[in-house]
Amino acid sequence: METKQGELLQIVRKTGVYGVRSIRQLLPSVCHTALREKIEHHAVMYQTMAKKAERMLYDRGILPRELCACQKMMQWVSIKMNTLKKQDTASIAKMMVLGCTMGLIEMHAVLNHQEQKDEEGEQLCQELMQNERDMIESMAQYL
């Protein structure tokens, strides 16, 4: 599976945009103050990474892809269903862990199959992946 130029930055941007959207939907259900602060901090990181990736795409003459409406709807329904069932701290932490894990899987898949190396893009991707791992680790105390 070879990927085309800019694919890594597209995935970094997508991960950031979906992360921000998910957290915005999830935050009204978060009552635990420390957990809420960690999640809000992660949202700011997602937004920063998405903006950096978008800027890097434009610098390379590549247009950022629009997010799929179907995926947006599925994401919204999934979060709503999960928060309707359980709003306890452990359930919210689990949702964060699962979301971060999905992002890591997608970024690793693209990173491992690039046809052209992009050192700057790889650096941004690695930074986001480390933030995802750190978030997973910080959520462990709430599970």
Image (cartoon, grey):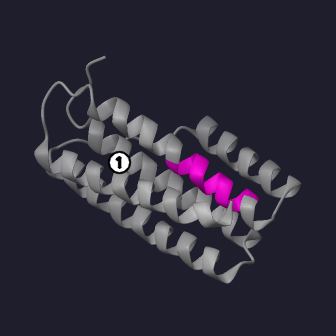
- For mark 1, what is the residue? 12
Residue 74 screen position, x and y as percent: 68, 40
Residue 127 screen position, x and y as percent: 29, 57
**Which quadrant: the C terminus?**
bottom right
Residue 99 lies within the magenta run? yes
**Which quadrant: the N terminus?**
top left
The amino acid type found where label 1 is placed reads: Val
Residue 25 screen position, x and y as percent: 67, 62
From this view, report whether residue 128 is shown above or below residue 63.
Answer: below
Question: What secondary structure is the stretch in magenta mostly built from?
Answer: helix
Residue 34 lies within the magenta run? no
- Residue sitting at 20 percent across and 45 percent down? 122
- Residue sitting at 49 percent across and 67 percent down? 43
**Residue furthest top as drawn:** 1
Q: Quadrant of residue 75?
A: top right
Question: Badge 1, how many Cα within 10 Å: few under 14, some, many 20+?
Answer: many
Residue in the foreground of this view, choosing between 46 and 63: 46
Left or right, residue 105 beside residue 119: right
Give SS at disc 1: helix
Left or right, residue 132 beside residue 86: left
Left or right, residue 61 beside residue 67: left
**Residue furthest bottom as drawn:** 33
Regarding residue 66, the answer to whether it shows in the image is no
Magenta span: 91-100
- Residue sitting at 57 percent across and 48 percent down? 99
